[in-house]
Image: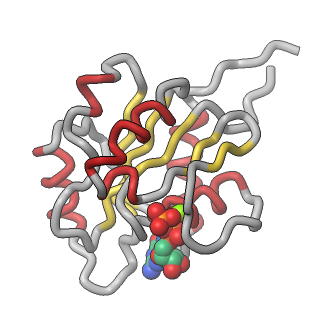
Amino acid sequence: MKMDQLGNIAFIGEVDAGKSALINKLIVQETNTGKTQSPIFYKGRVVDTPGEFVDNRSWNGALLSTISSVKTIVILQPATAKRVSAPSGLLRVYPNKNIVGVISKVDAEGADCAKAGTLLKQHGVPGPYFHTSIFDQASIDQLYHHLLSFQPVVLE
Ligand SMILES: Nc1nc2c(ncn2[C@@H]2O[C@H](COP(=O)(O)OP(=O)(O)OP(=O)(O)O)[C@@H](O)[C@H]2O)c(=O)[nH]1
Ligand SMILES: [Mg+2]
């Protein structure tokens, strides 16, 4: 049995939520830095999306089509944000996908994890929520193992 790779996952959240930085930590590929200008499809269909896809309503349709083929959606809510950017209709459009709520940047100045959790809950994102900081490997490992649990088991 083999289960060592993440795949079939899209990461969404507002500009600067930390999606690309988190993906870099989770799939360890160190190449992607800077602002994400358009969706990036990594090996195994790990999808990084630009924050504008949630921040700008006119791009919400592009977000929905970009993530249509993946099984798991990771919604990042930065611990510093005042509101939720992820489109509220998302969970209704795709009721059969795995939804994982992540409170990101928990180490950042002004972080308020309780507030981020309340916002996600009000928005209908199911818990438990994973608290992450790219500077805390244990927080990355915890999320990684949860995401692995959604991966198909490959028989060898
Ligand atoms: N303190 C702190 N900073 C972080 C963390 N994650 C990301 N950042 C920083 O936040 C900034 C934005 O991170 P990105 O990963 O590029 O954000 P993004 O969500 O991909 O943004 P877009 O591509 O514009 O949608 C960068 O300067 C990162 O170094 C974190 O856990 N803690
Ligand atoms: Mg990015």
Q: Nearer the viewer, residue 39 or 141?
A: 39
Kindly give the residue lying farthest to the right in the view shown. Answer: 156
In which quadrant of the rendered view does residue 113 lie? bottom left
Q: Nearer the viewer, residue 53 or 110?
A: 53
Q: Is residue 92 toward the left or the right of residue 129 in the image?
A: left
Vertical side of 132 occupied by 109: above or below: below
Vertical side of 9 occupied by 40: above or below: below
Residue 26 on image: x %, y %:
64, 54
Q: Is residue 28 toward the left or the right of residue 48 in the image?
A: right
Residue 47 on image: x %, y %:
59, 43
The quarter of the image holding the C terminus is top right
Q: Residue 73, can we see it?
A: yes
Residue at position x 33%, y 65% from top?
78
Residue 150 on image: x %, y %:
55, 27
Q: Residue 138, can we see it?
A: no
In which quadrant of the rendered view does residue 94 lie? top left
Residue at position x 36%, y 47% from top?
59
The quarter of the image holding the N terminus is top right
Q: Nearer the viewer, residue 114 or 28?
A: 28
In which quadrant of the rendered view does residue 109 lie? bottom left
Vertical side of 75 occupied by 25: above or below: below
